[in-house]
Amino acid sequence: MIENPVSAARKLTHNEVIKQAIPTLAGTIGAVLADPAADRFAEDDIQFLKFHGIYQQDDRDQRKVAKHYMFMIRGRIPGGVLSPQQYLKFDDVATQQANNTLRLTSRQSIQFHGVVKTGLGPLMKAINQSLVDTLAACGDVNRNVMAPPAPVNNACSLQVREDARSVSEALLPKTKAYHAIWVEGVQLNLEDPEIKDFEDPLYGKTYLPRKFKVAFAIPPLNDVDLLTNDLGFIAIVEGGHLVGYNLAVGGGLGMSHGNAETFPRLADVVGFLSREQLVEVSKAVLTVHRDFGDRTNRRHARLKYVLEEKGVAWFRQELETRLGYALPAARPYTFEKQGDNFGWTRQLDGLDSLGLFVESGRIKDAEGYLLKTALRMLVQQYGPEVRLTPSQNIILANIKPENRAAITQLLATHGVAVENQASILRRASMACPALPTCGLALAESERYLPALLGKIEQLLVEVSLADEEIVIRMTGCPNGCARPYVAEIGFVGKAPGKYQLYLGGNESSTRLNRLYKENLREAEILNELRPLLTQFAAERVGAERFGDWCVRVVLKETVAQN
């Protein structure tokens, strides 16, 4: 490992100190888990828990009374693919140990919310019994690897998903703590020399400075928002064959309000590689982050800042030195759009798939809309493969065509439509969970966006833009989990009831938007959007999208073509 001279000359963050002290990431998690008198973990263990896919939280709606501690658990599901049996196990876990909902994430995973400490062990054991785990779903390691979720529509789709799984497995940490705590139910002896001196063969003793995100995409569809990732692989298909990938490096969206050292950044495309080079290139890129990322300031610790400050030419040279060979130039590609298809689709193999809209990614039962129950019955009876999308929706794949009518009827009985599932505006929206569970949330998101979208829909009717697709995303804080910085309209929480308004993303998620208005109160949002949408309706050129119009007219910038 190369020592970063900048980090070496400045004081390391506390996270770096505790990782070095306990490189197995075990902490005292096992001991606290076994203690019936403890309802929560200490601060250091809270940081270690993240590497195990767990966040300790509290119900922020109850803070005026007392802190009600609970846990969020996130699965590691490469490419978002679950077998019918795995999905049913996740449904069981949500019912028995969590709050009876499954929260689809923007990285093709499932989160469980509202888990109390006594339910943590049984939940983790159940997940592992389904041959899924939560290892490295959070923490300073590679996170869940994303891949196109759409049904097989060309011969390369399956290969890309296989490659995504290979990269996910190659970048997993090797600590024994996960298995010891959650499968065997024991606390590792931290004084055992083998445990105390453990060093991960890829990550070293202190892992990464911050999280690391990987995604795969097949142009022209950019359904994973690929350029927002630390590491992206753009599939190059020639003559119907997957010949390799363009390598994109240095994307990331998280920032901090009022901190100019932090900002969203899209990845740079730096070269081309073959499928056979995928794993070694992935490891090499990750180790550049490991060795040069900022370990003295966690807000400035992502790979994107290494690229921004040292330059793409420097990065390419450093990468090729580690690989021992040069990468050829990137090959031509074009991203045209992002998002999911809804309703029934015929797959290349003759089977059917069904795309279902899940508002804000929350699978639950509500009055007149029993989505959770309907999905459970459907998966039990017809056994589709379940695929989670980066836009927080769900695809049921590999369905026999003769079952299409019965499935449509089953869903309708539970209030779930197959056609006209939601408005075009809602289908293009995303929100993060935010309040009351996320400790970082500054404002509402999941609980507020649906009502706001209803008001914006009415506004669009007023200005003769009914059924106009506009990508709208909202997050409760500037970390950007719902990727608001590439939306045509992005709302980012600044304080309770206040948002930063961003404008100018594009249909293909290849352009960052720009801050348009600060500290916008909820009551002011419609008044701010009304003149913009009115002018857009009157002045748009042809089928020009709202984000492109904002760049050209409001932000007065040249619309860049991908």
Image (cartoon, rainbow, N blue to C red):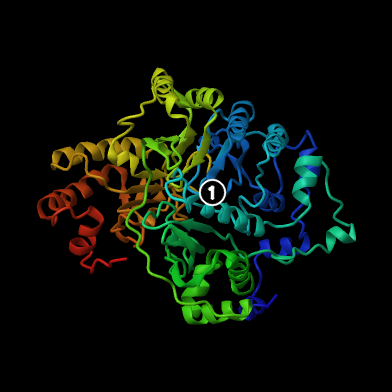
> Which is nearer the eye, 253 or 133?
133
> Which is nearer the eye, 228 or 350?
350
Q: Is residue 122 left or right of residue 351?
A: right
Quarter of the image with the N terminus is bottom right
Q: Position of residue 146 (x, y in %)?
A: 52, 52
Q: Position of residue 71 (x, y in %)?
A: 62, 39
The answer to which quarter of the image holds residue 562 is bottom left
Q: Position of residue 208 (x, y in %)?
A: 64, 64
Q: Is residue 256 visible?
A: no
The answer to which quarter of the image holds residue 331 is bottom left
Q: Is residue 341 left or right of residue 138?
A: left
Q: Residues within 10 Å of mark 1 (few under 14, many from 20)?
A: many
Q: Is residue 214 above or below residue 181?
A: below
> Which is nearer the eye, 81 or 19?
81
**Amino acid at circle 1:** Gly
Identify the residue at image location x=57%, y=49%.
78
Q: Is residue 501 above or below residue 110?
A: below
Question: Which residue is at the far left?
Answer: 538
Q: Is residue 308 above or below residue 150?
A: below
Identify the residue at image location x=29%, y=41%.
425
Question: Which residue is at the far top?
Answer: 413
Q: Position of residue 552 (x, y in %)?
A: 20, 64
Identify the residue at image location x=25%, y=37%.
455
> Which is nearer the eye, 150 or 519?
150
Residue placed under numbered mark 1 in the picture? 79
